[in-house]
Structures are given as C-alpha cells and as structure tokens.
Amino acid sequence: MKQILLAIVAFITFSCSNAQKNNFSTEALSEKLLTLDDGQMSFQDILKKHKGKTIVIEVWASWCGDCIKAMPKFKELQANHPEVDYVFISMDKTADKWKIGIDKHQLKGDHFMANDGMKGNFGKAIDLDWIPRYIIVDKKGAILTYRAIETDFDQINQTLNDLK
C-alpha cells in the first residue's frame, strides 16, 4: 500500500513539475540577462525584439552534455524552420565560457546569458529544472510549449509545422 501511495505522489509531483504554462511570470519578464556586448536586457525586451515572429528559446550551457548532444537535432530544426527566430539563453557561470561555447558550436540566433546560473532568479522564474529546455512562443506572444527537453524534438517540430 505504501508503494502505491508513493507512486501516486511521485506521479502527481512529476506531472505538476512538467505543467505547461501559457504566459511568463512577472518575475521572468523583468529579469535582466547579459547580452553579447556585456550589456543587460530584460527578458520582456528580448521577447519584444522578436514580436510578430515565432520564437524558439533554448536554455542551455556550454558545460551541459545533453545540450551538446542535442545540438545536431536543434540545427536540423533550424534548417527546417528558417522562418522562426531562435533565442539562446545560457546558464553558463562565466561570460567567457558562454561566448566560447557559442563560437565552438556555431550557434546561430540571438544570445543571452542568465546572470546567476541555473538556480538563480531567472531559472526559478521559468521553473527551470533541466537543460536543454525549449520554449516556443507564437507570433502573438502566446506560449505554445513551456517545457520541452532534448527528447521532445518531434513535438517541437510538429508544433512549428502546425504554425506554418
């Protein structure tokens, strides 16, 4: 009986942590992210910059093995959906490592870095529990996919195909 109860609690916890949201929290929108030129830009302003476009946001880090392993699939996604804007948000600990990672992996898109890592304010504000993490925002600014991971490329591709 205890095992069944534990299984139910684990299922509910996992289901809730994977919940899809349809908008970003005020905290997430107001959080500042580092730009490539060492400036700061709020997440809200990043979204405004891409207003009217479908956006795929990849949250990643240069030290993340799963992120690196997923890059060929992500690049294939980019090749199949050139009409989409791609925004990369790094969880690297230093700007140097982040910038080296962009060049090393030839990541094409708009680049930003969280100022305080995965468990910092931005990570908490977007309920970050795993990277790579993918978020899809449609042309109207609505979140279509709030939490997708590297095993969800079929779902991501289908969502983008449905938007064509």
Image: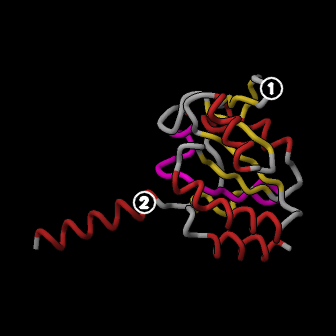
Task: Tell me which segment is drawn in magenta.
Answer: 122-141
Q: Quadrant of residue 12?
A: bottom left
Question: Magenta segment: does it hold 61?
Answer: no
In the foreground, 139 or 38: 38
Figure quadrant of the N terminus = bottom left
Residue ID at (79%, 35%): 45
Q: Percent position (x, y) of residue 103?
A: 74, 42
Which quadrant of the view contains residue 31?
top right
Q: Which residue is mark 1?
A: 37
From the viewer's perspective, is residue 95 above or below residue 87? above
Kindly identify the amino acid type of the residue bearing the numbered disc 1. Asp
Q: Quadrant of the rendered structure where residue 3 is?
A: bottom left
User: Which three-letter amino acid code belongs to the residue tagged 2?
Assistant: Cys
Residue sitting nearer the eye, 73 or 152: 73
147 vs 28: above or below = below
Secondary element at tag 2: helix
Q: How many marks?
A: 2
138 falls in the magenta region: yes
Which numbered marker is on residue 16?
Answer: 2
Q: Position of residue 160 (x, y in %)?
A: 77, 70
